[in-house]
Image (cartoon, rainbow, N blue to C red):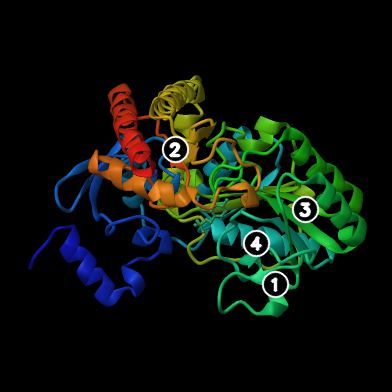
């Protein structure tokens, strides 16, 4: 039977809807067909054609240590030697919870689930159960996983109540979700004046990283905290990307804001399926078996997943880890900024710690509506050019890049050199 990327892609499409188990992987927003990953190590992967690439997707963020970290792998193998799943309490759940709370000391209790989506879904249910209110406020451009009530896009005009952004989501559900633009204190203040007393929670990615990188002003996040406190609504930080990425304390520590609840995923599982939500002892006491808010999981706290998370958090908790990663990210950012300038192209580089994004416009957007709609099209050409150079970026102009601690200086230099060549061809294209 034939192998190689093209052959696998053909077979995949014959058995899996669209050939993928998560839509962005299908390369619909960039030229060409998806690559099939054969294996990955540190900052690199090899595809089924035997070609190697520098990987800046890193499984969409979990692999902050790079692929196939030997300590994480060893921890998983060692756990596997003791059994694959128990469906009963086991010590690695406690160890990961203790490690988590020592790194995120603003919280007192943490519950593990199996994905970021599940973490957000559970946190929202908890917020509704604890406040006795139904209404949720989210922001345009923030992604919180694919739970029904969060697959909602901004209503048109003055109507802040959302429309389903996916078929299969009843309008009755989206009626309970309001959507506002980011970066707009005036809209936020007006919303809380009118609806604050029936709002269960405001949920936000404090470092919005799912529609480019829409870095928020401190004052905007402070206003989210103040208005939720004043109205008895809970503030939920969705830290599924930013948790353990922008620093060990996540965005909450970066901005010095204590949310009532926060959700985690990606890095906390070290590459295995883990999500988590955390809060105060009092708030988390609303969850079953202590309280009336039901949430459960057959595989939750799985020993292999807990082992991977524990090994990852232990490594990133070492002194100097984030400083070293930030140094690499800064070198990459400066190199790409220079490449943008040399190419004379309308673009700017956005960065928060080891997250980066190229906005194909002269001024960095802070809200979804401020993103140049042509930007993602220009990114498509950039993506194809970088791929030909052996550099893999997430296949959409709305996705950010992720640096790993095992990207070498040579990887970064090669990436800057490639970006310099590719950005120049973009200038020629538009000339
Ligand atoms: C990835 C992501 C999710 C969903 O996590 P899954 O593990 O894909 O379900 C939720 N919120 C944010 C901010 C994310 O980036």
- Residue at the front extreme? 431
The N terminus lies in which quarter of the figure?
Answer: bottom left
| 151 and 373: which is toward the camera | 373
Q: Residues within 10 Å of mark 2 (few under 14, many from 20)?
A: many
| Residue contact between numbered discs 3 and 4, judged by CB atoms under 8 Å | no
In the picture of the structure, the residue carrying the numbered disc 3 is 283
Mark-to-mark CA distance, 3 and 2: 28 Å
x then y, percent, for residue 367: 66, 47
44 in relation to 274, above or below: above
Mark-to-mark CA distance, 2 and 1: 37 Å
Residue at x 55% of width, y 77% of height = 167
Mark-to-mark CA distance, 4 and 2: 24 Å
In the picture of the structure, the residue carrying the numbered disc 1 is 174
Q: Which mark is residue 103?
A: none
Specify whether 425 is left or right of 404: left
Q: Residues within 10 Å of mark 4 (few under 14, many from 20)?
A: many
**Mark 3 vs mark 4: which is more N-terminal?**
4
64 in relation to 114, above or below: above
In the picture of the structure, the residue carrying the numbered disc 4 is 122
Residue 41, visible in the rendered structure: no
| 424 and 392: which is toward the camera | 424
In the picture of the structure, the residue carrying the numbered disc 2 is 312
Specify whether 325 is left or right of 253: left
**Mark 2 vs mark 1: which is more N-terminal?**
1
Check disc 3 and report its element: helix, strand or loop: helix
Residue at x 85% of width, y 42% of height = 226
**Mark 4 vs mark 2: which is more N-terminal?**
4
């Amino acid at each position: 039977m034939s192998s190689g990327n093209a052959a696998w892609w053909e077979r995949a499409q014959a058995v899996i809807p669209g050939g993928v188990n998560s839509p962005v992987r299908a390369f619909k927003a960039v030229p060409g067909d998806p690559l099939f990953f054969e294996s990955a190590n540190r900052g690199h992967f090899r595809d089924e054609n035997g070609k190697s690439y520098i990987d800046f997707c890193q499984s969409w963020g979990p692999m902050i240590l790079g692929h196939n970290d030997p300590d994480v792998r060893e921890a998983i193998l060692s756990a596997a030697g003791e059994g694959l799943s128990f469906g009963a309490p086991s010590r690695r759940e406690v160890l990961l919870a203790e490690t988590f709370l020592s790194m995120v000391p603003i919280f007192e209790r943490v519950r593990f689930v199996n994905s970021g989506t599940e973490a957000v879904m559970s946190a929202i249910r908890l917020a509704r159960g604890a406040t006795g209110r139904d209404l949720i406020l989210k922001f345009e451009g923030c992604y919180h996983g694919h739970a029904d009530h969060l697959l909602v896009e901004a209503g048109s005009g003055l109507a802040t109540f959302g429309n389903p952004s996916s078929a299969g989501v009843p309008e009755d559900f989206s009626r309970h979700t309001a959507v506002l633009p980011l970066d707009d204190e005036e809209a936020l203040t007006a919303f809380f004046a009118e609806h604050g007393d029936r709002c269960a929670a405001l949920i936000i990615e404090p470092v919005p990283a799912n529609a480019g990188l829409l870095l928020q002003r401190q004052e905007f996040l402070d206003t989210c905290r103040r208005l939720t406190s004043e109205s008895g609504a809970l503030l939920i930080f969705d830290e599924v990307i930013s948790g353990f990425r922008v620093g060990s304390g996540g965005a909450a520590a970066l901005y010095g804001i204590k949310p009532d609840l926060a959700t985690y995923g990606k890095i906390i599982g070290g590459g295995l399926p883990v999500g988590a939500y955390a809060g105060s002892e009092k708030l988390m006491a609303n969850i079953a078996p202590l309280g009336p808010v039901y949430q459960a999981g057959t595989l939750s706290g799985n020993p292999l997943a807990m082992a991977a998370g524990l090994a990852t958090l232990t490594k990133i908790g070492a002194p100097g880890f984030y400083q070293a990663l930030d140094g690499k990210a800064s070198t990459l950012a400066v190199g790409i900024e220079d490449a943008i300038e040399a190419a004379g192209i309308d673009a700017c580089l956005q960065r928060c710690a080891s997250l980066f994004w190229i906005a194909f416009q002269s001024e960095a957007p802070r809200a979804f509506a401020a993103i140049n709609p042509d930007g993602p099209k220009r990114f498509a050409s950039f993506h194809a050019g970088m791929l030909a150079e052996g550099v893999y970026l997430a296949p959409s102009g709305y996705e950010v890049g992720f640096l790993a601690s095992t990207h070498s200086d040579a990887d970064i230099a090669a990436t800057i050199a490639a970006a310099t060549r590719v950005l120049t061809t973009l200038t020629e294209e538009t000339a």
